[in-house]
Image: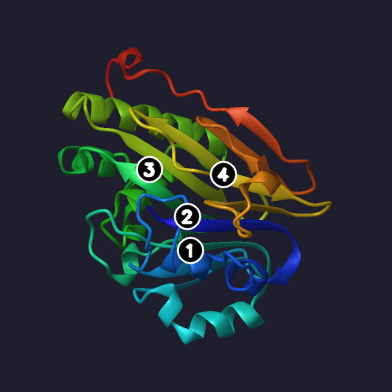
Amino acid sequence: MCRWIAYSGGTVPLGHYVTEPRHSLVAQSIKALESTAATNGDGFGLGWYGEHVEPGLYREIRPAWSDENLRYLCHHLKSHLFFAHVRAATGTPVVRPNCHPFACGRWLFMHNGFVGAWAQIRRRIECLIPDAIYPSRMGTTDSEALFLAMLGAGVEADPIGATEQILHRVVTLIAEADPRQSLRFTSALANGEDLYAFRFAFNDSANTLYYKTSISSIVVVSEPLDGEAATWKVVPENHVLIARANCAPEIRALRVPSPRAIDDVA
């Protein structure tokens, strides 16, 4: 599975979290400690907010450890809210449009997980993406499809509710296609001010997710940057971590009913 970092707080160089720690994201791309895929070398990406409403993006298909530009960018780029992601592909091609994070308007999204029965349910999930948003579908990943479907479900007005709605539909589609299949959804979503980190699974255990706070910042990670889990807090399974601007972080249970509670998701 992929590894990622999300940061929100005072403006800092990206390298402070992406490249410099002992168990940095670059180090995790070579050898992850808490992942089913020890190596995450199928591309990487950065997404950050600066002077503009829309985020900046840098994505590459080479492994993070082999791109010298990444270290230079992380040394010079500064941001108050940024994402970084290293990819372990789960069946879709290793091409730049499939590298995380994904952006649409002012929103950023990245994902670590898996959508079971994807070949059977892909068309029905893509039908959840409104026509006005569909031109932003640049790649072929399940992750990007979920993101755009979430936007179509009303992320702008209610980020958590829209995400719950799409998760609700996806687990039902999976259950209908093959009850043995699963969904793992550990993801981050941001709009330049607020950060949401989701940890959810259906028919499986959720991928790991940790966070650490200071007086003015929060960092959310797939696995601890110092390799010491005891110094980090765990986001519980089937919960969302909410870090809104100028507010203390909070954790809330996700309300995703059983697939049996849905009559029609067509």
Residue appearing at x 69%, y 56% in the figure: 8
Q: CA distance from mark 3 to mark 2?
A: 32 Å
Residue 128 visible to the viewer: yes
Q: Secondary structure at mark 2?
A: loop
Check if mark 1's residue and mark 2's residue have beta carbons within 8 Å.
yes
Q: CA distance from mark 4 to mark 2?
A: 20 Å
Check if mark 4's residue and mark 3's residue have beta carbons within 8 Å.
no
Q: Secondary structure at mark 3?
A: helix
* Residue type of the residue flagged with mark 1: Gln
Residue 106 visible to the viewer: no
Q: Identify residue for label 4.
A: 197
Q: Identify residue for label 2.
A: 33
Image vertical order of residue 113 relative to residue 11, above or below: above
Q: Secondary structure at mark 1?
A: helix
Residue appearing at x 15%, y 38% in the figure: 120
* Residue type of the residue flagged with mark 2: Leu
| First in sequence: mark 4 vs mark 1 | 1
Camera-side residue: 38 or 71?
38
The crowding category of the residue bearing disc 1, from other C-alpha atoms within 10 Å (few below 14, some 14 to 19, many at least 20), is many
Q: Position of residue 128 (x, y in %)?
A: 31, 39
Q: Which quadrant holds residue 18?
A: bottom right
Q: Which quadrant holds residue 158?
A: top right
Q: Position of residue 46 (x, y in %)?
A: 51, 68
Q: Identify residue for label 3.
A: 149
In the picture provided, is 244 more to the left or to the right than 264? right
Q: CA distance from mark 1 to mark 2?
A: 7 Å
| First in sequence: mark 1 vs mark 2 | 1
Q: CA distance from mark 4 to mark 1?
A: 19 Å
